[in-house]
Amino acid sequence: MRIVSITGKVIYIVGVYALLLILNVFLFQRLVNSTIDVVIVAILNVAYIVIGVRTFRGADENREDPRVWWRATARPAAGFWIGSGLVVAAGIALLGALASKPDDAFVPAVACLVYAAFGAFYLHSSYRLRILDVAP
């Protein structure tokens, strides 16, 4: 399955994000402690992004073969925007972790690590795509 249309991509992004939010608020937070909750949510967010990256395709991309492991977006600009947003989110989470009491710092620290890892992934992807655009 490949998601090619803008409408399909928006439905996936908003729909799955809403599903994860609802599961977290109404299920995970009620059944497990906050430490396990943040780990579950982090794992589900990793799966959400990995599935999206693997199924989204640009108009000029090969839709049959899988993407190379490092490619996150069809064009460099999209990855730079997404990666920059994730790096900003990682910085905000880092500030939250540093401003928290030690007992409360785990949740923002995990968020910081996840955001930073995905920010680096998107920025790395865009950097490589830009090099491919310039290469002879």
Image (tube, helix red, strand yellow):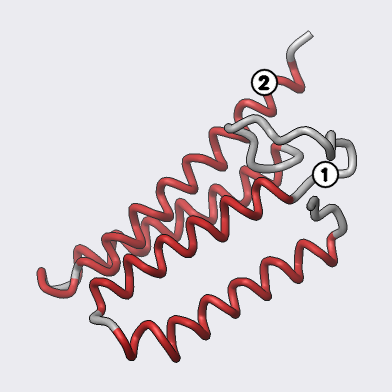
Q: Which residue is mark 1?
A: 58
Residue 16 lies in quadrant: bottom right
Q: Residue furthest left?
A: 102
Residue lying at 11% horizontally and 73% vertically, measured from the top left: 103
Residue type, label 2 = Ile
Say whether disc 1 or disc 2 marks the residue closer to the N-terminus. 1
Q: Quadrant of the C terminus?
A: top right
| Mark 1: secondary structure | loop
Residue lying at 65% horizontally and 48% vertically, measured from the top left: 53
Residue lying at 34% horizontally and 52% vertically, measured from the top left: 113
Q: Judge whether 81 appears above or below 13 on screen.
A: above
x%, y% of residue 20? 52, 76
Relative to residue 46, is residue 72 drawn left or right? Answer: right
Label 1, label 2: how far apart the Cα atoms are:
18 Å
Q: Residue furthest top?
A: 136
x%, y% of residue 114? 39, 54
x%, y% of residue 73? 69, 43
Q: Which residue is mark 2?
A: 131
Residue type, label 1 = Gly
Q: Residues within 10 Å of mark 1 (few under 14, many from 20)?
A: some
Residue lying at 67% horizontally and 20% vertically, measured from the top left: 131
Relative to residue 11, is residue 82 drawn left or right? Answer: left
Q: Judge whether 31 appears above or below 136 on screen.
A: below
